[in-house]
Amino acid sequence: MSGQRSPDCGLINRLRPMRFRFDGTEYSGFEGDTLASALLGSGVEVVGRSFKYHRPRGLLAAGVEEPNALVQVGAGAHMQLNLRATEVELYEGLEAWAVNCWPNARWDLGALLRPLERFLPAGFYYKSLMWPNWHWYEGFIRRAAGLGKISGEADPSRYELQYAHCDVLVVGSGPAGLAAAASAAQAGERVLLCEQEPRLGGSLLWDRCRLADQELSGAAAASWIDEKLKLMQGRNEVVIKTRTTALGYFDHNALTLVERVSDHLGPAAPAHRPRQRLWQVRARRVVLASGALERPLVFPGNDRPGVMLAAAVRRYLAEYGVCAGRRALVFTNNDSAYDTALALKKAGAEVVAVIDSRNAPASALVSAVGNLGIRVLAGSVVVGTVGRPGLRRVTVRDASGVIERFRADLLAMSGGWNPTVHLFSQSGGSLQWDAEHGQFRPGRSVQAEQSHGTANGDATPIEPLWSVVAPGKAFVDFQNDVSLADIELAVRENFASVEHLKRYTTLGMAADQGKTSNVNALVSLGELTARTPELTGTTRYRFPYTPVCLGAIGGRLRGELYRPIRRVPLHDWHAARGAVFEEYGTWLRPAYYARAGESGHAAEQREALHVRTAVGLYESSPLGKIIVTGPDAAEFLDRVYANTMSSLKVGRLRYGLMLNELGVIIDDGVAARLAEQRFLVGTTSSGAPRIAAMLEEWLQCEWTDLEVLVAPETTCSSVLTLSGPKAREVLIAAGIDFPVAADAFAHMSWREGHLAGIPVRICRVSFTGEMSFEINLPNAETENLADQLMRAGQPYGIDLVGLEAWLLLRTEKGFLHVGADTDGTTAPDDVGWGHVLKREHDFIGRRSLTRPENLRADRFQLVGLEPVAGAELPIGAQLRSPGMGASSEGYITSAAFSPSLGRWVALAMVRGGRGRHGEILNVLGDKLRHAKITAPGAYDVGGERLRA
Amino acid sequence: MLLIPCPWCGRRDEIEFQCGGQSHMVRPEPYQEVSDPQWGAYLFMRDNPKGWFRERWVHVHGCHQWFNVIRDTVTHQILVSYRMGEAPPELPSRSVP
């Protein structure tokens, strides 16, 4: 093939030449070119290598269906992979590389494998790479698979998401789409028209078009486009988007489009514009005017560079002013390709002949080309091509079997037309086979959409020719190197269902999703298995219609914006005091406060010891707070908690467990009775939204007779917790207006009043095992109170405590941490709460607790572990009885080194553990350790310190 | 993406909702009289029809209200939504195309 610029046609701007590089070589094109048209215009024959066999490939198509010209564009973080050169608009300085070849597409070392082609048929590795082990070959296969090389850098581009609603979404701006959009606009409807190409007009830009009573081409077509655009201009409810592809059609007329906002500008793109924009559109109705895609013909040697789709040849001429060859043949089974012969002739190329597989093509066509001196070889087919790498000769066989050879550098082929039914099919509509025109067209609709124009079926007169029987490799799927012989092999081996064929041969599974290959393949499959295409059916058309980059799908939801990060009210205050933050659930919280030269572990040990010996200040604002109020509040909580809450007195606190209906512990916390009909339900920090939602569900859906309101108030107030033997002194020193002595303010009660002049509710509840005061206060006063407590606490050695030390302290105490010590199987009895079964009252999960599984004696039960000989106890370690062949008896759920006890402390789930206190188990790990089973809790077992 | 008619807020995108599965499940009570098979059926057994299905949804990023929907599991067409406590409408005999 020797493509070249044709002097006086095309829509490119010849006053603006642009330089670009392909595989390291510099070329030039014009503004308005695609990379593909610029390469073709520069005479480049080989634009890529096939995936499996590394065969040299040239351009087959001019649009999104192009299977061969996959390129990577740009460098470094901005690089994009596996773009079709036909979709890449040229810009000054563009750099592109062919994929799947080295060092370049023209000279590819991978092609050294080509002599092995006949040993690598479809499914070869299922058969041959089994012995002795697939993993022997895996590394090689993985390197050979995949196209392109990623930069490894994060893409710095910005991608946006846009929602849109409209009366009519029109997909495609060809004759059918423009007509539909203009008439909807005139009727006053809200119209969104999307066109995947940079120019409006679709096939009007390169083809004759019959519209109702008139035939449009060239200048007449251009003025028709202008006329339709004028009808839409100035209407503020009409949006026209070019470079915008409809990728997916989902339920209830929801469609996804991707708009390539500034890809075509390259590095010159202004920084304020996103690279791409994803559109989520909800349309009252949808007009699918997506046109039709031409099919290749299947004959030996049909993948040689220089063999192109006939309509693509017309398009390169009319839109880009590029003539794809100097000496051309046309091979067709239908009328449409005759236009290619005429267009090439007009552009000055030599057209040797039209090879028409039909015995009697329409005489008007024959004379139209005959008048220009072009032979028509009716009843003939191409049986071979020669040329390395590009086309040089074509072998033709006529109806009587006589062979004739032609010299040519371009073979334009047309196997007929496939309506672009991808979106229709995604919408749920079923396809019907039109045997007369040899195509699948839209059948029954299930959503509010209509297919217009050639998307609804094409009426080009055709006599289907699905494959030419002749020796040699005839390709069906160009991108994945699937030949007719591979399909025959699959059928021989009984992969005769269309879905099996696809997986076995990888047909249609490449990045082009079989746009040019699927119908050819499944009709051939049908012929081999004596079925009509209706019976073979099609594989599913899926989202996305064309490949889309992950950045566009992710949009702005990357990095910090991936999901909201919640910060505690005193975030900056903590940061100023050396806090190191970590994410716990959705919250960013101080893990510890690092001093100079101190490791995280050392800080955690220091802070924990400080709580045991003096007093620590800890922010517990994320603790879940849910107000439950109403005449039936107490009854409701009796059903929600595994333990009784209605007997709780106003002013008192009670710890409770919540279960789901399966009887599994899902949350725990402390409830406060604020008034007779008003409770404050405390949940874990991560459980707060989930539990509030669960309470609502039970009230709205199950217990609709209860008069109860639920109000989640977690972030309505802050919580500062003082914990340690000196905690009370700090309260008094800061100035508190109610008595806090042990007899006046007992453990598990709450009081309201003022602390340092700030209104507070203080709950005496402890997670550390030390005397603790949880101080609830208005958010706005948090920093003020924290400052005052730090000042007042100075004489008592007050210091800040992070979450890591906090969790260490509770591990020493053996207090339960739901989600760490429990999992999706843990029932109350497993953590020592068997007494809830004595309750008469029903509660969520109650009935499940007496299922046989829950009554087994060998369930995992919570225990403490005491190291033997000072052993380390790693979290997650499996526990095993001594002796050979013993199986796992459980595992460690929480563990820490206790600075107070000078040894490791741990909690574990052990099979039947409650009855095994005193037993020694092996702790599995990098070396063998031993631990003794105890009751949970190693520090202040009697609990005197927290009641002090 | 479904367009779901919330009886309180009107039609909204599916991303604003969560599905709670089959609706009108009856919780067997009192628990003392519920057999293991009965309880197991309540916990685990759900209808899985090809066609119309009553299910409950919550407008979790909206009014927080639970409501019922009749949806075709094949076409995803939504026939009607109705509030909790309202009598469930009859299911059509077959799918409306």
Image: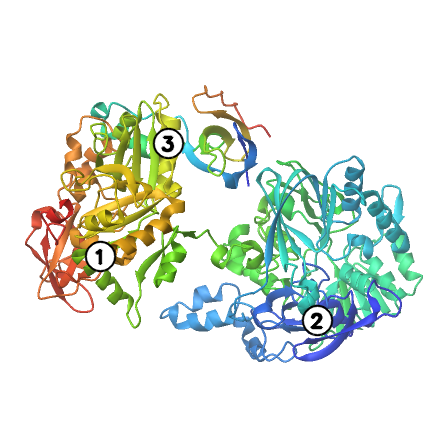
In the picture, the disc for residue A305 is 2
Cα distance in 3D space between marks 3 and 1: 33 Å
Exactly how many numbered labels are in the figure? 3
Give whichever of discs 2 and 1 has the lower sequence position. Answer: 2
Residue A870, visible in the rendered structure? yes
Chain letter for the residue marked with disc 2 in the picture: A
**Farthest top residue in view:** B87
Q: Nearer the viewer, mark 2 or mark 1?
A: 1
Among numbered discs 3 and 1, the one appearing first in the sequence: 3
- Quickly name the residue at label 3: A710
**Disc 2 from disc 3: Cα separation:** 71 Å
Q: Residue at x 56, y 72 (%)?
A: A117
Q: CA distance from mark 2 to mark 1?
A: 70 Å
Quadrant in the picture for the N terminus of chain A = bottom right
Asked if marks 3 and 1 fall on the same chain, the answer is yes
Q: Report the residue at 75% width, 67% height from top.
A: A37
Dot 1 corresponds to which residue? A808
Q: Are marks 2 and 3 in contact (CB under 8 Å)?
A: no
Q: Please state the horizontal and vertical placement of residue A361, each as a whole percent of the image.
A: 83, 54
Determine contact: label 3, label 1, CB under 8 Å: no
Q: Chain of mark 1?
A: A
* Residue B65 pos. (x, y %): 45, 31
